[in-house]
Image (cartoon, rainbow, N blue to C red):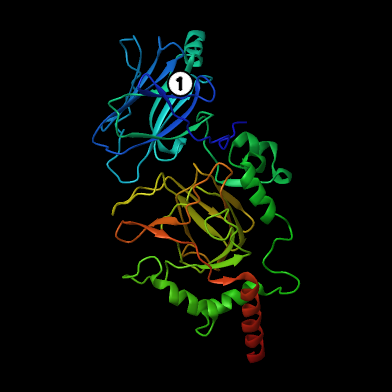
Amino acid sequence: MNNPLNQPKAIKLFKFNDKFKIPLIVSGQGIFMFENKDNSIPCTFAFYNSDKTDGLIVEFRLDGVKVNRIGHLHPYTDPLNKLGLSNLNGAFYWFSLDSQNKRFYAGVGEARLDTVVYEYQLENTKDNKLFLESLDHIKVYDNSTSLKPIRLIRDPITTSIPMLVKNTNDLTMDDVASGNYLPKPNLSAMSQKLYDCIGGVKFVLDTDDFPDFSKAIEYSIINPNGWCYKKLQDKSREFNPDKPNLLETYLRITLGENNGESPGIPYVMEIWPIGHYSPIHNHAGAEAVIRVLHGSINVSLFPFLCGSKDGVRNFGNLNFNKDNVTWISPTLNQTHQLKNLDTSTETCITIQCYMYDQENLTHYDYFDYVDDDGNIQQYEPDSDMDFKEFKKQMQLEWSNKLKII
């Protein structure tokens, strides 16, 4: 089964005849991800064999993606392709080379089938397979001065990538065959670690010592004297200081300390009243696992974080219910928006877990988000209250309510 999270290794660049040479991790396959700093200027790169006698030349232009084989007169043209470079801020690009299926994909934003703008299928011949398998490095052309490599991923794109994770004990043969669920073992090692920390049967909100915890939170949200009610009011300017918006608020209740291995404290219980939502934001290249503890949350995915008033359309949307788990990797599901839909009947409470993988040495301590004016802003993940203190506060408010009744 294809693992979409396999080894998202960072690119290593080498000088080669005054041009960059990027070795493929596996000959004949992989995903090349890059930025183009000036999208008015086309950018060109090529996949070559070892002696540069054969290869593919790839050009990203404003009007589309052009692919040619060296020495051949007929280009590999996708008649439906009309898009290449984007005029939207924040856009980045990718090209997938697949020798096993003899297929090319190109896209804008996250590397996945949802963002494809170009597709070409070669004939299923032995010669085509041998040709593609001979390609072992990428060369960026000298005139592509605005092209900046981001990442090289070992495996090509072959299938859609599910948002919903299933644990081994819940996974059926039909689940694997349908591809509607991501098996928990297919998560990266870091995300599996996070999953194991919050995926157990005893990791629940309503416990024996406080069976009405979720009810107490609901009461605190609607009670004008409640801590949750007041804190949500205080946070109405958090993401847009000049435009208070109560609905664009949620509460962050943190578990433990920041050990320098994540953007903010790695374990956060987030509280989403009905109709409340986050701005569109990304997650600093971190790994993450999100589990719903109470209610349901709607997640919309975006190809990239767009600094534009009109923004960019979402490509994925799914509702997650109690005990459902979703995930984020450095290259997938990074940019999203969460909302407790207006049609919901109860507050949503999630546990969000973030951690950088071992290759990430940057540790960018912010989530970037899009404000109401279309500008990208920084948000430093903070804590509204420590979990132990919050639980005591809810117990106090709930006991006072019961005394009144």
In the image as oriented, which residue stretches furthest toward the left? 40
144 w.r.t. 70: above or below = below
Q: Is residue 54 left or right of residue 193?
A: left
> Mark 1 packing: few (<14 Cα in 10 Å), some, or many (20+)?
many
In the image as oriented, which residue stretches furthest toward the right? 208
Q: Is residue 404 left or right of residue 310?
A: right
* Residue 116, image x, y percentages: 40, 34
In the image as oriented, which residue stretches furthest toward the bottom? 404
* Residue 281, image x, y percentages: 43, 55
Looking at the rendering, in which quadrant would you find the N terminus? top right
| Image point (52%, 56%), residue name | 263
| Image point (65%, 72%), residue name | 388
* Residue 269, image x, y percentages: 59, 64
* Residue 355, image x, y percentages: 58, 51
Q: Secondary structure at mark 1?
A: strand
Is 158 in front, or is 79? 158
The residue that mark 1 highlights is 137
229 w.r.t. 326: above or below = below
Name which residue type carries label 1.
His
